[in-house]
Amino acid sequence: MLAVDMTGDAVKAKNGSMVAYDGQMAFKKMTGGGEGLRGMVTRRLTGEQMTVMEVKGHGTCYFADRASEINLVTLHGEKLCVEASNLLCTDSALRTGTTFTGLRGGATGNGLFTTTVEGTGQAAIVSDGPAVVLRVTPQYPLSVDPGAYIAHQGHLQQHFQSGVTFRTLMGEGGGEAFQIRFEGDGLVYVQPSERNTIGGDV
């Protein structure tokens, strides 16, 4: 559970994630993930669904999502790319948007787009179990199961690649027929469990 102390400021949070609060709070549903009408249209076209509410007031507000682990990411002008289902809340100063992520979406079944969070402030992302942060450098690229991927930041390029091996063809593999390959310099957040994915069942 995440406790956010507010003194008249606001946060943007996943709709329905507030579990309790003390003090005086006001709640307002935001369209298009907080990006207005254009953001709402973009999200409908891309399939990257995110319903957001603005919470503003004085006191402490508590957020949670299905007893998931909560991980705080501090941004200093950078951009964080995160699956919409894994974004719990952000400081109101952070801008949210949608970006094209290439063929990775074809493996996850979540569309070809992902949510972006950009600016200076903190974002809370959720994971099924404690998230692991993996470093990617030009010398050490990283391949990730799309079902375990949560988010990434930094100067990274993504590639969708087949992970079919002899064991997979014999029916003895773990089902990870496709992976996301990250190259460049940055961080990738993964969870110690897997969502059901189209790619993993092929």
Image: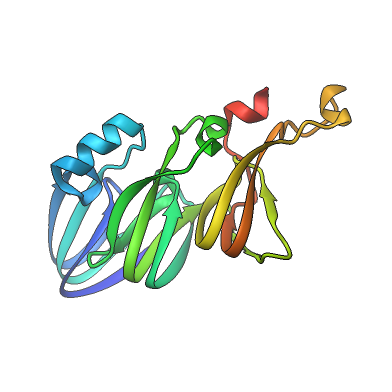
Horizontal and vertical percent position of residue 159? 60, 44
Task: Answer above or below: position of 160 versus 122.
Answer: above
- Pick whichever, 191 or 96, lies toward us: 96
Colour basis = rainbow
Horizontal and vertical percent position of residue 72? 44, 67
Q: In which quarter of the image is residue 92?
A: bottom left
Direction from residue 198 to residue 49 in the image, left or right: left
Horizontal and vertical percent position of residue 170? 87, 22
Task: Answer above or below: position of 46 versus 99.
Answer: above
Q: Can residue 157 be seen in this view?
A: yes
Task: Answer above or below: position of 123 versus 15.
Answer: below
What is the tally of numbered marks visible in this picture?
Answer: 0
- Look at 62% across and 53% down and name the residue there: 182
Direction from residue 118 to residue 32 in the image, left or right: left
- Pick whichever, 57 or 174, lies toward us: 174
Quarter of the C terminus within the rendering: top right
Q: Is residue 19 visible?
A: no
- Look at 54% across and 34% down and name the residue there: 108
Quarter of the N terminus within the rendering: bottom left
Direction from residue 152 to residue 53 in the image, left or right: left
- Look at 28% across and 46% down and name the residue there: 16
- Look at 52% across and 50% down and name the residue there: 150
Direction from residue 70 to residue 6 in the image, left or right: left
Horizontal and vertical percent position of residue 13? 28, 55
Task: Answer above or below: position of 84 versus 162.
Answer: below
Q: In which quarter of the image is residue 190?
A: bottom right
